[in-house]
Image (spheres, rainbow, N blue to C red):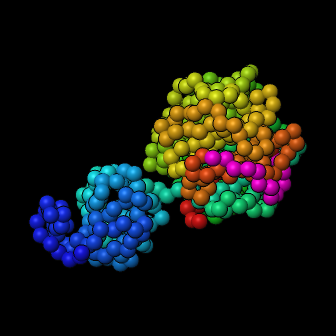
Amino acid sequence: MSGPVANNVFRSSGVIASAAGGLSWQDVVTASTVTVSAGNGYPINTTSNTCTITLPSSAEAGDQIIFIDYARTWGTYKIIIDSNGLNYQGEDDTYIVEYDTSGQTVSIVYSDATVGWIPESDVDVTDAPTPPHTQKALFAYGSTGSSVSLSNLVNSSGVVASDVTGVGTARDSLPGAGYGTDKAIFAYGTTSGGNVSMSNLVSNSGVVASDVTGVGTARRGLGAAEYGTDKAIFAYGFTSGNVSMSNLVTNVGVIGTDVTGVGSARRYITAASYGGVAAGTAICGYGYIGSNVSLTNLVNNSGVVATDTTGVGTGRHDLNAAGYGTDKAIFAYGYSGGYLSMSNLVSSSGVVASDVSGVGTARAGAGAALYGGDKAIFGYGDTGSVTAITNLVNNSGVVAADVSGVGTARSAVAAAGYSLSA
């Protein structure tokens, strides 16, 4: 059935009624994709699948479209709105627009080219749109026995490319993180001359820039993660001893001065984002304080590091972590009296799960990053000798078997996600 009918949205007869303003209600949509037109209302039935809704490619001020949760199942299978080249709440169509509240009704009206579509009635206005998810990654720097300056790009399918001669000072034992929604930054580390305080920005096409003189204490063995949707944090590490400090990075890649840390000073930790792009939270975990520890520190969306949380799982150092599944994280590998092959999943609320027996070669000093929007990759590392293998992690947090590596085998490597384009 299509065309206007009268009175309430669902009458006792089950017939769908017309929307306010004379909109025409269309047949119930059960497909996984639908292209819609202005002036219509659409009951979206997601009982069995998520539905991606493509909006018109052109619109005029005052155009209106309504979507309703036909079976009250958007909380199980959400709707995703593709704004098809037009803006949505002032953001371009690379941003993610999704609604996942059961029983929800969304009414959108087109304003102008600047703001685009505006939800005039929904229960998640502040959460939609959210920044899109990182699609590509890169591994950079590391040690082959001596520090190197090179990088390997990772495409949105998790395929690692051959070596790109690096820019900047060769070094190892540094971390990387995303910032600015689609770029990355590598900072700190150690060279043959000792610990350094410098950074290298990475463009959204994966090009590593030259050295920027660092701000803050030179150190190695620290962790880094994106937080607050478009900023980054570097935390903990080793100078002439373990430290508890952090340095925040703005959304244009500028590193701030030292902030006295909270929690146990330690080195060879790792960090990752969790909770989803909109939440903007991160977690620092594990490390070495004279012995291996299993503890974590959550980071809120303002970059404030919380006190220690007693860890779950095997205490270890020289592991790495990355986000996966759009709102969760995974810690994997490391060293504790020997090389380890294990992982610990982190929930969307920052709770670390118990050990999962690992898949792939036990090692330490691997890098890890989010790629493909909701997956992760671990690569390179030390097994007793340097290696170039990788392990992909699916969007459920399952670690896959070894993939023969591409590029120079090395350990103490950094990794980060970049680019919103697949």
Q: Is residue 303 left or right of residue 330?
A: left
Question: What percent of the width, then of the height, locates residue 117?
Answer: 32, 66
For residue 254, say whether it is visible.
no
Q: Closer to the camera, 203 or 288?
A: 288
Q: Closer to the camera, 343 or 135?
A: 343
**Total number of numbered discs in the rendering:** 0
Which residue appears at 76% of the width and 28% of the height?
Answer: 336
Q: Closer to the camera, 397 or 123?
A: 397
Vertical relation: 329 (above or below) 37: above
Q: Residue furthest top?
A: 290
Q: Is residue 101 left or right of residue 382?
A: left
For residue 344, say whether it is visible.
yes
Question: What percent of the width, then of the height, locates residue 151?
Answer: 75, 56
Which secondary structure is most common in the magenta stretch?
Answer: loop
The image quadrant that residue 332 belongs to is: top right
Question: What percent of the width, then of the height, locates residue 71?
Answer: 30, 57
Question: What percent of the width, then of the height, locates residue 224?
Answer: 62, 41
On-image quarter of the C terminus:
bottom right
Q: Residue furthest left?
A: 7
Write down the region rendered in magenta.
398-410
Inspect the magenta stretch and tell me whether residue 408 lies in it.
Answer: yes
Q: Is residue 5 left or right of residue 148?
A: left
The image quadrant that residue 296 belongs to is: top right
Vertical relation: 107 (above or below) 377: below
The image quadrant that residue 339 belongs to is: top right
Which residue appears at 24% of the width and 75% of the height?
Answer: 1
Which residue appears at 17% of the width and 69% of the height?
Answer: 18
